[in-house]
Amino acid sequence: PQPRCATHAAMDLDLNIAGMHPASPNKVASVAADKKFGDLNYPLLQGSPVREPFVSPAQQTKRITCCRICGVCCSVLLAAVVIVLVLLARAIFWSPTYVFHALPDNFMRWNSTDAALQGIWQSGRLSKSYDNGVMRPPMGWNSWNQYMFGANETIVLSIGKSMVESGLAAAGYVYVIIDDGWAMSVRDGEGRLQPDLNKFPHGMKYLADELHRLGLKFGIYSSVGTETCGRFPASMGHYDLDANTFADWGVDYVKLDRCGWPSEAFDIQGMDLGRSWPGVDYSMLPQAARVALGNDYPLQHIRYNKRTSRIPGFQAMAAALNKTGRQMAYAVCNWGQNDDWEWAPEISNLYRISWDIDPSWPRMMEIYEIMAQVAAYASATTCGSFADPDMMEIGVDGHIDNFKLIYKSSLSPTESSTQMSMWSMWNSPIILAFDVTNPKLAWAVEMVSNPDLIRINQDPLCIQARRIIMTREPAKCKPAYKRCRATDVWLKPLANGSFALALVNVADTAATILPWAHNESAKYGSETISVPWKALRLDESARLTVRSATRRQDLGTAQGIVSVEVAPHGTEVLVLTPAP
């Protein structure tokens, strides 16, 4: 007989119950069985006693395998249909709403001391429970966006050597961080985390020592719950042990993710659908749908629904790292879901403000809008703790919303320049993710090595830029319009008495399922973005020297106003200094 699936399997079950299956002691249907199953209208159960053909165990196995394959195929098809429908809805209906937060009345005092400026723009130096001396935004490289679970000892050491040889290390990129997937699936006999020796045959202490010999620092990954996002052992119940293990290995940076907390699913509390078939975690779908529809951040206010209770776990790891006595930069990766800007600055050096980034302009602009709101909180960024909008996508080829079933995407050079510019203006960690060993990506190495932007990022005032001018003409760009305009201006005071302006041509931000249609929409073009001195509360007669940090060029002096033409999705960062 040919392998059969659901309908035949159900018939087999009924026949077995009736006593007709060859595995049953009674191979002939009884009169009672005839009466019991007669109303089901099965031919085999009516009339004279009939024996069912013998089905061998091998044939039964084939039937079961057939059913499982059918189930997997249906799951794949269903998932594909859901993703296509979500992306279609996003392309048709998604339209961002923008919120403007005004600056304080005394936001710019040109003759103020650095301390006075910090007092105006920030809430002052926090009383940090985790204060390890890491005072500037970390700069380095992380394995996840390029290699995901595939990072190994050879790749990491090759990346480290290339960072030194390319000049990235000299530019400040000193952390080399291994993300999820480095550990064995079980702890050792003493309860310690242990590396996967197939990937890291010499262990983590060896890897740290080798990176230290190159003048680099070593970073590692864990999670606040019982397992990581990749289902490897995590730190809940082992915070002190793991912190000591990391210190013993010579770790310099610890990223603690938010996965594995008991009873909490990906986004909706209590909804954990688990894995329905290998490689797909359906518990991710609720949050994934929100991101695909452009709703990963609150449009009218800053607050997320506080569904989670992971804060004590992050605090416990901070205390455990403190007790080791080793300086380890501490990255809280809670995806912003507990209004992390309200508590994370006190216990960490950097904290994520959103779900994962991907190499697409719409996703980057969603994070951009979150940062516009986070920056309104005076305590969001201070020296020693920085809001983290996630890793750099410059030079990375990846998948939209990080789903491999969706087409690959990458940022254009113009969009990449905007990411480098804004991460610098925000005092955000600059963690690279591209393959720095690839000679074809020399342009990316040059872009992220821009010393003017790095100086802005590492400025000792640690003041995060805020958006001061936002233009949307019209307020909502519709298909009927031939021309639309969307530009922003951000302001950031610097320690040397200068200040930086970021002029951003936001242009289109809506996503589409067409891979060629979401970049440089025809409705948008290059814009001349102007900043009058009045907007900066300067005397119109003041003369300022102007330097483009983006192009590393002096542009002369300006009086009363400064104007620059900016391409769609582009950013021009200007440093303005009072002329002598």
Image: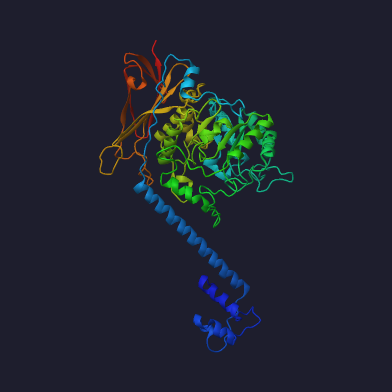
Vertical arrangement, residue 231 with respect to residue 421, above or below: below
Q: Quadrant of residue 314?
A: top right
| Residue 314 is at least partly visible in this image | yes
Q: Quadrant of residue 553?
A: top left
Counting from the top left corner in percent of width and height, residue 137 is at 53, 28
Say left or right for 539 vs 466.
left
How did the renderer colour the structure? rainbow
Vertical arrangement, residue 479 with respect to residue 550, above or below: below
Counting from the top left corner in percent of width and height, residue 177 is at 58, 36
Counting from the top left corner in percent of width and height, residue 563 is at 32, 23
Say left or right for 67 vs 555.
right
Image quarter of the C terminus: top left
Image quarter of the N terminus: bottom right
| Residue 403 is at least partly visible in this image | no
Counting from the top left corner in percent of width and height, residue 347 is at 59, 32
**439, 417: nearer the viewer:** 417
At 66% from the left and 46% from the top, the residue drawn is 184
Instruction: Farthest residue to the top: give it.
Output: 580
